[in-house]
Amino acid sequence: MTTSIRERLDAMRAFYAEGHTREPAFRKEYLRRLQEAVKAHEQEIAEALYADLHKSAEESYISETAIVLAEIRDQLRHLERRARSRRVPTPLFLFPSASRIIREPQGVVLVMAPWNYPFQLALDPLVGALAAGNCVALKPSTTSARTCRLIGNILGEIFPPDYVSVFDGDHAQTAELLEYRFDHIFFTGGAAFGRTVMEKAAAHLTPVTLELGGKSPCVVDRTADLDTAARKIAWGKLLNAGQTCIAPDYLLVHRDVKEELLEKFRRYAMHFYGGDFRRSAAYPRIISDRAFTRLQSYIDTAERIVWGGEYDASERFIAPTLIDSPDPGSPLMQEEIFGPILPVMTFDDTESAADFINAREKPLALYYFGRKADGLRLIGRTASGGACINDTIIHIANPRLPFGGTGDSGMGRYHGRFSFDTFSNLRAVAVSRRRTDLPLRYPPYGRSFGLLKKLL
């Protein structure tokens, strides 16, 4: 007989109530087991990602496996310190009490992962939730079917199902999961479904972390080193064929350097993938027919394609494509692209570039190439979840940096200690002595009120 979702979640709550996950030693033991399993299954992970997305083994390791292993190492190294209660100063008027912050697990949490980085974006938040002492219901995306099955197999080898339970069903299962109460929901995906997650969570007053997306601008000023900029932009844009939530979504290039930058971009893109993108074993494919059709429509309706534009529906192949000066009101410039198509806009000064960015929803990332001081000024005039100066993408790989969005690109932060805090309840505790007291705080106040005012 198939165990129902309710029965599985009830079993997880019972396991959590036993208290095992509150012990740092218990958490570390299972994180070590996960670490060894990820290393042992490295080849299978690469094969699954190739089957789902046509990712090369090297790209799979760099952009998925290595990031998960770095997160596990960071949590293992700092777990006991992060889990420890911390004393904080107490104001004099609260004498003779002491104050501390206790980080305790939230309980049973739901992690919902997307298809584009199906291994990294399932396991990274899972690691943080486990480090903080929670039981985890994990819902990987079935769109990346091979990777979804592999995740279920790997985690099933390590964790009791009452500790970590993988739900690998269809959309109906996802919808049913959202009807239940969790102690936290962590969702990575599109803004449209993110709103649904938030609405369902609101029914139970469940806190949420939403890792969404948006149109991340890439600004190239005339002070940029164009060779370095072109190489890093081509890498960041074509990683996973542009199916990356923090990929440069559109270029804002200073008019004086536009042509030179685009020529260098073309050269590096061809160098990365051997000049023939269709035959390259390292160039990824679009995940689904639906996604392919949407990207194809951008190309078919483009007025000025300056490079690329080739596609093949039978392989879900889309070549790197540069589209010059599209209509700012077009779908290409209003929707997150999530593919290897890069619109190119020009600007004459950074003030106008900032105005262009600020006229749109807040992006998940912002990239600037040029002088550091100018980049910091642009960052100060705009809003985004994260940013890089003279680089792309790399901020996601540092577990000491918080990762997340703002506005339409999401809410909440994770990675490293930020994951630990996201999946923890920070409990404020004041401890007073049993017999010692401060009479000043009690009425009637009389003449002692003047002294009390000074203490306050």
Image (spheres, rainbow, N blue to C red):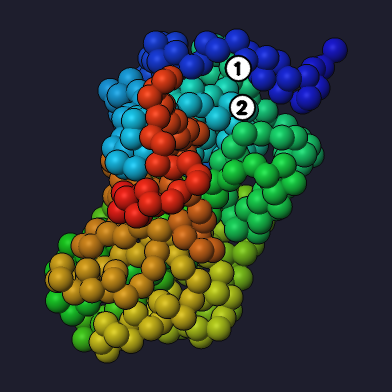
Q: Is residue 256 left or right of residue 416?
A: left
Q: Quadrant of residue 186?
A: top right
Q: CA distance from mark 1 to mark 2?
A: 7 Å
Give coordinates of residue 123: x percent, y percent. Answer: 48, 31
Q: Quadrant of residue 436?
A: top left
- Count of marks placed on residues: 2
Mark 2 crowd level (few <14, some 14–19, many ≥20, 10 Å Cα):
many
Give coordinates of residue 1: x percent, y percent. Answer: 85, 12
Identify the residue position indicated by label 1 in the image.
16
Residue found at x 33% / y 87%: 352
Name which residue type carries label 1: Tyr
Nearer to the camera, 375 or 247: 375
Q: Element type at marker 2? A: strand
Identify the residue position indicated by label 2 in the image.
108
Q: Quadrant of residue 85?
A: top left
Give coordinates of residue 454: x percent, y percent. Answer: 30, 53
Residue found at x 32% / y 75%: 381
Q: Element type at marker 1? A: helix
Above or below 413: residue 106: above
Residue found at x 62% / y 64%: 294
Nearer to the camera, 247 or 267: 247
Name which residue type carries label 2: Val
Above or below 287: residue 377: below
Which numbered disc, 1 or 2, marks the residue that appears first in the sequence? 1
Nearer to the camera, 227 or 89: 89
Q: Are marks 1 and 2 in contact (CB under 8 Å)?
A: yes
Give coordinates of residue 446: x percent, y percent. Answer: 43, 51
